């Protein structure tokens, strides 16, 4: 039973990270993001996060949802990106037993491979 729950948690986290990576990839390729499909994925993620995620990941995911829905467009990019980075870091910490030393900066570097943009982002 414990192995099944661990597998469900891993799959839940993998699906969430994949959703963000696919969104980034589509944006870089200038593809239109299918809002309906994205909403379905988020609804599935909500269900799975509620069932299988740690409390910290649950709270980080809710923070992402609130941030992405409440911010004005002007502030949105920074705040949503920050909440995504926090969520990914929290997922890593949960999967690594809080032993992960990977920072939000490290995650953004993985996503963008652009040190100048990272310095600008965290200099804000």
Image: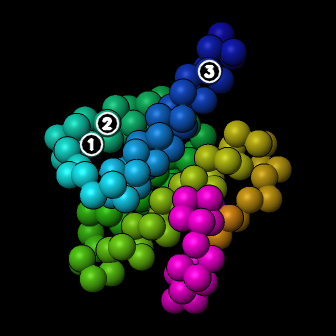
The overriding secondary structure of the stretch rendered in magenta is helix
* Residue at screen point 62% across, 77% down: 115
| Range of residues picked out in magenta | 107-124
Indicate the position of residue 124 as horizontal and vertical percent values: 51, 89
Q: Nearer the viewer, residue 122 or 63?
A: 122
Q: Which mark is residue 38?
A: 1
Q: Splitting the image into 4 quarters, where does residue 96 fall? A: top right
**Badges 3 and 2: C-beta atoms under 8 Å apart?**
no
Q: Residue furthest left?
A: 36
Indicate the position of residue 83 as horizontal and vertical percent values: 47, 64
* Residue at screen point 58% across, 82% down: 116
98 lies above or below 124: above
- The residue tagged 2 is 41
4 lies above or below 110: above
**Badges 2 and 1: C-beta atoms under 8 Å apart?**
yes
Judged by depth in the image, the label closer to the viewer, 1 or 3, is: 1
Spatial distance from mark 2 to mark 1, Cα to Cα? 5 Å
Q: Residue furthest top?
A: 1
Q: Can you say which quadrant of the picture contains the N terminus?
A: top right
Q: Can residue 114 be found in the magenta stretch? A: yes
Scheme by which the image is coloured: rainbow
- The residue tagged 3 is 7
* Residue at screen point 27% across, 58% down: 30
Q: Residues within 10 Å of mark 1 (few under 14, many from 20)?
A: few
């Amino acid at each position: 039973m414990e192995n099944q729950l661990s597998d469900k948690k891993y799959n839940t986290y993998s699906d969430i990270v994949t959703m963000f990576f696919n969104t980034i990839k589509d944006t870089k390729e200038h593809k239109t993001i299918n809002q309906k499909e994205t909403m379905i994925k988020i609804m599935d993620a909500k269900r799975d996060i509620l069932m299988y995620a740690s409390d910290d990941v649950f709270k980080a995911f809710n923070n992402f949802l609130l941030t992405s829905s409440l911010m004005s467009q002007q502030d949105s990019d920074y705040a949503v990106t920050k909440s995504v980075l926090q969520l990914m870091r929290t997922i890593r910490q949960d999967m690594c037993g809080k032993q992960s030393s990977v920072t939000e900066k490290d995650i953004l570097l993985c996503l963008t491979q652009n040190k100048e943009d990272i310095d600008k982002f965290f200099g804000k």
